């Protein structure tokens, strides 16, 4: 078993032949809590050590007195004279306080819509974050709405797990935008001078003939694989006792081993673990030393509690110690999310990540397991950490996320990206955004701003609005018939503080549903599938038979993922029955 108590970069393989003294001590914060993985630089030798999981340290020194520099991200750096004859108790002060109330918390937001307007629009509390489904909104009163761009796909593979087990699904586990994100709906590269390509299509709504669907497709620029910057990756792996199941730690080990095959010499990998202890399992290692990295992963053993907070703190410190300016600095957290030591609430974890992301380190969350899987915690961490979130239900999904979609998962082309849509009330009576539902707690927060998303290389987003059109006889002679809606895409380039914006006008020309390209009709089947799983009142006129027929008619027979969706709809139909709409008490 590797020593995870003290060492990050320097190792004790070099022994001080002249050392006659041993310096011992502990490091704590202002609240007397132990601080792990604090950097300790011994001036006489220039060697770097780290405090252990309990904040303690022991360092061989060549003389009775010496001096140290003690530092940690977010804390004041200390320069200390020390005496080996005395036990050192070192207190560190924070440079700034954690964010008390992070603002950007909503996935979507309609301007001027007050809490009193949506009071009661709730669903039952499940094991996942309680969500409020987006309602129809009158365009004449609230013409502007917006939503965050997100590349998360976790909900699809989690839904697949439930259905493959023959189980119904908690409605709040179904996030329709993540079901749509799982598929490629015809990627179109942006122009050479642009970061995004946008297009829109208007058609009939297949589950309500009186309504229309507006499709908005946004494609992000692909990074040039020959110019991918070096990566500083920290694998933060949960090795607690709760991970001792075949579909948890063993699956994660095989997943990370797949990822290692993509690494280059210029990339650096570190491994931090948390369980019976918290610390650095493998110090920063070049990506071409694959045998060492693979062996370190293979040697992981589960056991102990789940001190997730301490593990996150340690991983961010390691990432900052190896920070590459202009590179891809990222922590990859792999866990079932069952934190039970330290800060465990979603609110406290949200503050923790909001504080740590200021250093420019991204966060990818990989969720595994069942039973005690904490989807809501991992979703909070990913969204607050400028990151993305995937659920691995099998090794094939791990290969898709970490190998086939390697650059999309790990390389960013835009930060804090969100879209603002202004509907034309001359043509649109009411509208509702499909998916991007907000958490109940976020909606009750007065600091309700859109939480921009991280967009990965080559991501293709398909967003959908269900519209109630203005009756043709009611459109006045002075009405604006030139546009259905105007779209503004706001974003920042990675490492850039400049806010950028690109505009696009959605045209009102209606395309008959049967004449739509297959990818748009297939996207409609996914939205209907998700609505049925969520027991949405908006698909009450349709049912599983309709979703299945729509998917079969538009499926690409050469696309294995699309064919898989058909099998999932068939399984859902058997589980939920053949009724048009699943009863609320099912």
Image (spheres, rainbow, N blue to C red):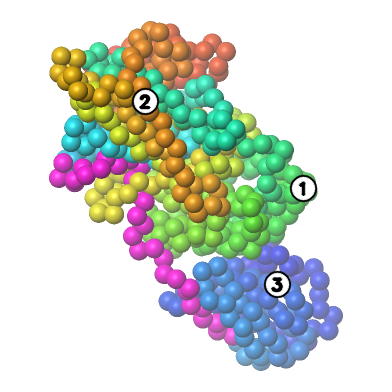
Quadrant of the image containing the N terminus: bottom right
Q: In which quarter of the view is residue 285 placed?
A: bottom right
Please say whether residue 285 is visible from this viewpoint. yes
Residue drawn at the location 52% of the way across and 13% of the way down: 556
User: Which residue position holds label 1?
Assistant: 265
431 vs 129: above or below: above
Q: Is residue 101 magenta?
A: yes
Give the magenta range.
88-117
How many other residues sit within 10 Å of disc 1, few (<14), some (14-19) or many (≥20)? few
Give 207 or 580, whichever is nearer the viewer.
207
Q: In which quarter of the view is residue 39 placed?
A: bottom right
Marks 2/1: CA distance? Answer: 46 Å
State the count of labels: 3
230 vs 206: above or below: below
Q: In which quarter of the view is residue 264 placed?
A: top right
Secondary structure at badge 3 equals strand
Please say if the residues under marks 2 and 3 sit with CB atoms less than 8 Å apart.
no
Secondary structure at badge 2 equals strand
């Amino acid at each position: 078993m590797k020593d995870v108590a003290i060492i990050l970069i320097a190792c004790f393989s070099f022994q001080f032949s002249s050392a006659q003294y041993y310096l011992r001590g502990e490091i704590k914060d202002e609240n007397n809590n132990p601080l792990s993985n604090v950097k300790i630089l011994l001036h006489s030798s220039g060697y770097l050590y780290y405090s252990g999981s309990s904040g303690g340290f022991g360092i061989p020194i060549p003389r009775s007195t010496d001096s140290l520099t003690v530092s940690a991200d977010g804390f004041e750096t200390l320069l200390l004279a020390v005496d080996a004859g005395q036990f050192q108790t070192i207190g560190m002060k924070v440079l700034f306080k954690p964010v008390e109330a992070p603002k950007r918390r909503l996935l979507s937001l309609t301007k001027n819509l007050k809490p009193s307007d949506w009071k009661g629009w709730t669903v039952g509390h499940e094991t996942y974050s309680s969500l409020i489904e987006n309602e129809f909104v009158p365009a004449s009163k609230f013409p502007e709405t917006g939503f965050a761009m997100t590349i998360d796909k976790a909900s699809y593979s989690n839904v697949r797990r439930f259905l493959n087990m023959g189980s119904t699904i908690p409605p709040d586990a179904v996030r329709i935008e993540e079901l749509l994100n799982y598929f490629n709906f015809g990627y179109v590269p942006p122009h050479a001078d642009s970061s995004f390509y946008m297009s829109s299509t208007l058609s009939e709504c297949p589950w309500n003939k009186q309504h229309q669907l507006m499709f908005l497709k946004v494609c992000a620029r692909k990074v040039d694989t020959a110019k991918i910057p070096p990566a500083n990756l920290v694998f933060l792996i949960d090795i607690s006792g709760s991970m001792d199941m075949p579909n948890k730690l063993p699956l994660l080990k095989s997943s990370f081993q797949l990822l290692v095959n993509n690494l280059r010499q210029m990339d650096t990998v570190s491994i931090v673990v948390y369980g019976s202890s918290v610390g650095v399992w493998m110090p920063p290692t070049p990506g071409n030393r694959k045998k060492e990295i693979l062996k370190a992963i293979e040697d992981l053993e589960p056991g102990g509690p789940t001190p997730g907070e301490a593990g996150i703190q340690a991983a961010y410190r390691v990432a900052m110690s190896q920070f590459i300016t202009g590179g891809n600095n990222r922590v990859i957290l792999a866990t079932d999310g069952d934190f039970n030591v330290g800060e465990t609430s979603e609110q406290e974890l949200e503050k923790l990540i909001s504080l740590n992301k200021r250093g420019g380190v991204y966060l990818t969350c990989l969720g595994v397991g069942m039973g005690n899987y904490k989807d809501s915690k991992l979703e909070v961490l990913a969204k607050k950490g400028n990151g993305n979130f995937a659920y691995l239900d099998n090794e094939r999904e791990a290969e898709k996320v970490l190998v086939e979609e390697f650059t999309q998962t790990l390389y960013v082309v835009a930060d804090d990206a969100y879209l603002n849509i202004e509907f034309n009330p001359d043509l649109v009576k009411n509208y509702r955004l499909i998916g991007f539902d907000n958490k109940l707690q976020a909606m009750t927060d007065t600091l309700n701003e859109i939480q921009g998303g991280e967009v990965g290389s080559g991501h293709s987003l398909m967003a959908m609005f269900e519209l109630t059109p203005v009756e043709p006889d009611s459109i006045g002679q002075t009405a604006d018939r030139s546009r259905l809606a105007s779209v503004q895409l706001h974003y920042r380039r990675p490492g850039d503080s400049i806010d950028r914006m690109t505009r696009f006008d959605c045209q009102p020309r209606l395309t008959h549903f049967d004449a739509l390209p297959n990818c748009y009709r297939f996207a409609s089947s996914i939205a209907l599938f998700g609505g049925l799983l969520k027991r949405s009142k908006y698909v009450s006129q349709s049912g599983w038979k309709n979703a299945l027929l729509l998917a079969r008619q538009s499926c690409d027979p050469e696309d294995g993922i699309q064919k898989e969706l058909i099998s999932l709809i068939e399984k859902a139909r058997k589980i939920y029955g053949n009724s048009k709409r699943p009863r609320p008490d099912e």
